[in-house]
Amino acid sequence: MTRHLTRRPNRLAYREPFFRNMDRLFDEFVRPTMTFDWEREDLGERAWMPSVDIAETETEYQLLAELPGLTKTDVDITVENGVLTLKGERSFEEKKEGKNFHRIERAYGAFSRAFVLPTEVDGEHVKATFQDGLLSIVVPKAERAKPRKIEIG
């Protein structure tokens, strides 16, 4: 009795072009955006955006922004056409007095945040205070935007 040997096709041979293409796509598009080595992190890659809480009362808007490491002279506040804009910059002071940085996780650079206020505001009476890295802004609503009770006659 003779045995007939038939050769089965290698299943991996059919899958190989797929995996080769996937590896190529990964190498070209995904891997450059991933940071595996902490020495390759670039200071300019991260955008610096301060966190802001916004609250509303019947008469005003209250904004509280976290700006650690800044002073009041580092921040500009404008209100124009119902848009409140915060601009500023946190600069990186590189002092090399025997110090080598191994990791820089805090973000630096310029920032700009704009907030559209949903009602008309009184831009002439905006008040801002800065203490312990917190910027507090009070934006009063315009008189015509404030709720008022209508008497039935």
Image (cartoon, rainbow, N blue to C red):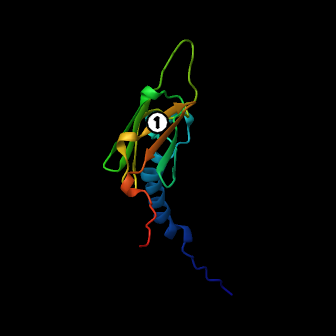
In the displayed orientation, state which residue is furthest to the top: 97
Give coordinates of residue 143: x percent, y percent: 38, 53
Residue at numbered disc 1: 128
Q: Is residue 4 left or right of residue 58?
A: right
Q: Is residue 32 left or right of residue 4?
A: left
Quadrant position of the C terminus in the picture: bottom left
In the displayed orientation, state which residue is furthest to the bottom: 1
Image: 147 above or below 47: below
Q: Is residue 11 something one can see in this rendering?
A: yes
Q: Is residue 123 left or right of residue 24?
A: left
Give coordinates of residue 28: x percent, y percent: 42, 51
Quadrant position of the N terminus in the picture: bottom right
Image: 128 above or below 53: above
Inspect the image, locate mark 1, and give the three-letter code of the amino acid beneath it. Answer: Ala
Question: 129 or 104: nearer the eye?
Answer: 129
In the displayed orientation, state which residue is furthest to the left: 81
Image: 94 above or below 122: above
Question: 73 or 110: nearer the eye?
Answer: 73
Question: 131 or 146: nearer the eye?
Answer: 146
Give coordinates of residue 20: x percent, y percent: 47, 59
Q: Residue sitting at 38 percent across and 50 percent down? A: 121
Residue count near mark 1 (Cα–Cα under 10 Å), binned few <14, some 14–19, many ≥20: some
Task: For mark 1, give the secondary structure.
Answer: strand
Image: 121 above or below 101: below
Q: Is residue 83 left or right of residue 95?
A: left
Q: Is residue 42 something one can see in this rendering?
A: no
Q: Residue sitting at 51 percent across and 35 percent down? A: 67
Question: 130 or 151: nearer the eye?
Answer: 151
